[in-house]
Image (tube, rainbow, N blue to C red):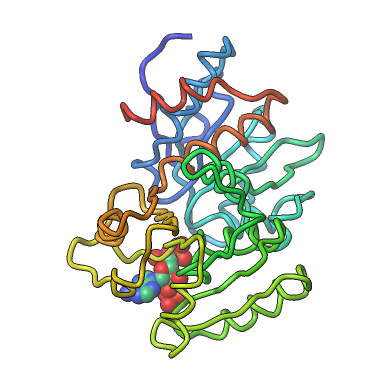
Amino acid sequence: MSQELPHQYLQSEIASIPACARLAVIGKPIVHSKSPQMQQAALDAAGIDMRYIRIQGGLEENDLDHLLKDLHKAGFKGLNITVPFKKKAFQIAEERDALSELCQASNTLIPTATGWKAVNTDGPGFEQALRESFQMELSEKRVLIMGACGGAGLALACQAALSRSPEIILVNRPRPELKELHAKLKACAPDCKISFCHFDSPEFYDAVQRAELIVNATSLGLDESDPMPFPADLLNASQALYDIVTHSTALAKAARGRACRCATGESMLLWQGAYAFEHWFAMMPHVDAMRQALKQA
Ligand code: ATR
């Protein structure tokens, strides 16, 4: 189906959405989301005559409930949910997958007869991104996650526990949620070695050196002037760094300078989208078409 790029709609404009729109990403703000280009390419490559659009949700108490009811009634085939609605979407859903249950947040909704099923494809998307970028299985690696209490870091930490990574080190600035997350993951994966620390804890640098996979899920690096979370000379060539920011950060550059394998968040964006498509249509999409569309977005 060839057509112009999908439009953006405000929640209040739902009534004006064209009938061919059957999938959407909901967030606020939403204008920068690349999911429409990526998912439209997948729909077109599969010959599915539907449009994927952006919808900007409202922030009032019941806005998301109303929006999800309206879209269900309108026959939407699937939704992606992004910041700041992932927790709320999880709460509203009638059914949830294991990763959503563990991190209490979901990025994908699938319609059921009466409402929505919530799944979280960020975790599986991350696992596949590691396979693709590093030929690495999360289930076999000692992983250190910086920003474990943030939205993305939390999902990845929970995925590491579900995948039974042999060691999981949770790093965040001090906050009570870090200890709570540690306890929750220990209960989920009692056989894994799981610890937590802060950026200024004495054990942090040792943990960086011990990790086989270092994940930066903090927003550090979004700004050119951001400091490094740790000195680059702690890194060595046997380690891999996954930075969820979709451009190359100072940390990623420093890691490359230390001959570490290094990847940034585009691959996770791609694969979480591919698995969302699989949930909606019970088949894998044409991933290379999605990848091309992302490059051009
Ligand atoms: P999200 O919407 O994913 O939660 P966020 O609020 O930008 O995004 O935070 C993502 C992560 O980056 C959080 O773990 C956050 O740490 P806090 O829990 O302490 O806020 C982390 N983060 C943001 N700025 C940081 C900084 N300057 N140093 C270290 N961590 C930082």
Q: Is residue 205 left or right of residue 163?
A: left
Residue extending furthest toward the bottom:
202
The mark total stands at: 0
Q: Position of residue 9 (x, y in %)?
A: 42, 35
Q: Is residue 251 left or right of residue 70?
A: left
Q: Position of residue 143 (x, y in %)?
A: 55, 64
Q: What residue lies at 19% left-to-right and 61% top-to-bottom?
A: 224
Q: What residue lies at 70% left-to-right and 80% top-to-bottom?
A: 183
- The quadrant of the rendered image in which ligand 1 is seen is bottom left
Q: In front: 195, or 46?
A: 195
Q: In front: 69, or 251?
A: 251
Q: Quadrant of the C terminus?
A: top left
Looking at the picture, does residue 184 appear above or below residue 131?
A: below
Residue extending furthest toward the front:
237
Q: Quadrant of residue 226?
A: bottom left
Residue extending furthest toward the left:
225
Q: Position of residue 213 (x, y in %)?
A: 50, 60
Q: Is residue 29 left or right of residue 109?
A: left
Looking at the picture, does residue 209 appear above or below residue 125?
A: below
Q: Position of residue 123 (x, y in %)?
A: 61, 51
Q: In front: 19, or 250?
A: 250
Q: What residue lies at 55% left-to-right and 42% top-to-bottom?
A: 131
